[in-house]
Image (tube, rainbow, N blue to C red):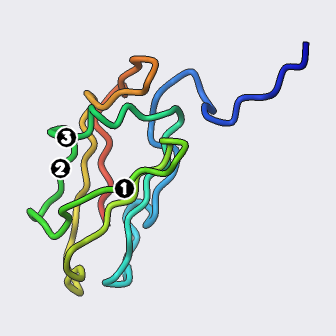
Amino acid sequence: ILALPSITQTSNIFFVESTTPTQNQTNVPITTILSFTFSQVLNTSTLPGNLEWSPTGPITSFTVTPNNRQVSLTPNVNFANGSLYTIRFKKEVQSTTGNSMQADFELIF
């Protein structure tokens, strides 16, 4: 029997592994598409109602990569220069195995 390594999960704990932009990054280009990579395959049906941003807008939609580990948020207008933004994934977001994050995840930039 040939066993191939899994490329869809990198941890037994479900969390946000990496982001673009990074936490507290300044001078983020106003046309940046936000990207979040999770440690496990994301159950996309748990995103609605558990994804928030402040100030309200300008993000209106998200896309998920084919392996369902990366979420991209595309703004419908450019981010304003000199503004502070917060993106929050609530801890109720789950992986396909039913794991929830241990706490809300916030990205501030």
- The mark nearer the N terminus, 1 or 3, is 3
- Residue depicted at 34% across the width and 37% down the height: 44
Give 103 or 92, whichever is nearer the viewer.
92
Q: Position of residue 95 (x, y in %)?
A: 42, 27
In the image, residue 45 above or below residue 78 = above
Picture quadrant of residue 32: bottom left
Give the labeled residue for mark 3: 48
Say left or right for 43 vs 41: left
Mark 3 residue type: Pro
Residue linked to disc 2:
52
In-front residue for pair 23/29:
29
Amino acid type assigned to the residue bearing label 1 in the image: Thr
The quarter in which the C terminus is drawn is: bottom left
SS at badge 2: strand
Name which of mark 1 and mark 2 comes first in the sequence.
Answer: 2
Q: Residue at x 46, y 57 (%)?
A: 19
Q: Residue at x 37, y 84 (%)?
A: 29
